[in-house]
Image (cartoon, helix red, strand yellow):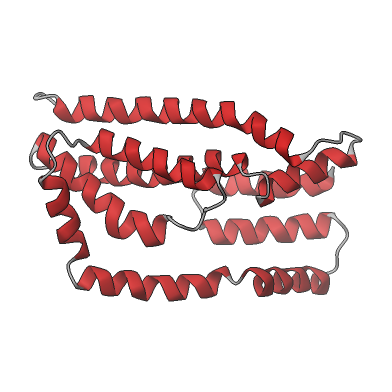
Amino acid sequence: MWVLLGIAVIVAGFVLRFNPLLVILASAVVTGIAAGLDPLAILAAFGKAFNEARYVSIIWIVLPVVALLEAHGLQERARGLIGRMRGATVGRFLTGYLLVRQGLAAVGLTSVAGHAQTVRPLVAPIAEAAAERQAGDLDDTEREKVKAMAAATDNVGLFFGEDIFLAIGSILLIKGLLEQYGINLEPLQLSVWAIPTAIAAFLIHGFRLWRLDRRLNRADRP
């Protein structure tokens, strides 16, 4: 049970708002030590994970592409597009994006969208433009709220959509953990039971987006 200390480190780190990468690193080190691994074994595990995943290398490739697109007016064109759409609101736009993101994740296309390649250059600017169309000039608090909801929409769509895909890592992790306790389930069974959760997540976050629309449409909003 000592290996669960890593979870406590993650919870404490996020509550205290430390750097997420440092929190995860500290959690991995604590978990490794609690499991009886020596420092070299922990370092080797980090190296193996980095070599297999190479997520850092992907980030270095994506960011220059996003910067180049923004330099050539990507955000301005996105704002212009939403401005020509009648009846477009920030809530409706983000609800549509949530549906698309969740649907793509459900069929295993988790890397098609994301914060770096979609939310930062496209989704957040379009959401801001829609909010300005609804409420006029936004103050800093309202603007940050719209950006936060755009990022949260991507998170919810990915997190609750990917478990529907039976070959995703989280499903295989759950299957492996249950097998350790003598519970044998097929990945398809776990995926089917993820569907009600995904539907509930869509409805709950959709309600939050509807409330955001209501708040922006109020003439006496703070």
Is 106 or 149 nearer to us in this picture?
106
Locate residue 215, reporting x and y percent.
Answer: 21, 27
Residue at horizontal 23 percent and vertical 53 percent from the top: 125
Quadrant into which the N terminus falls: top right
In this picture, residue 194 sits left or right of residue 101: right
Locate residue 206, reporting x and y percent.
Answer: 37, 29
Quadrant into which the C terminus falls: top left
Residue at horizontal 89 percent and vertical 36 percent from the top: 181
Is 162 or 103 nearer to us in this picture?
103
The answer to whether 214 is drawn above or below residue 107 in the figure is above
Quadrant of residue 34 in the image?
bottom right
Is 84 or 147 nearer to us in this picture?
84
The answer to whether 19 is drawn above or below residue 129 in the figure is below
The answer to whether 120 is drawn above or below residue 199 in the figure is below
For the question of whether residue 222 can be seen, the reply is no
Locate residue 94, reporting x and y percent.
Answer: 31, 39
In this picture, residue 206 sits left or right of residue 38: left
Residue at horizontal 21 percent and vertical 64 percent from the top: 74
Locate residue 129, reporting x and y percent.
Answer: 16, 47
Residue at horizontal 29 percent and vertical 60 percent from the top: 121
In this picture, residue 158 sits left or right of residue 88: right
For the question of whether residue 167 can be seen, the reply is yes
Is 51 or 17 nearer to us in this picture?
51
Quadrant of residue 66 in the image?
bottom left
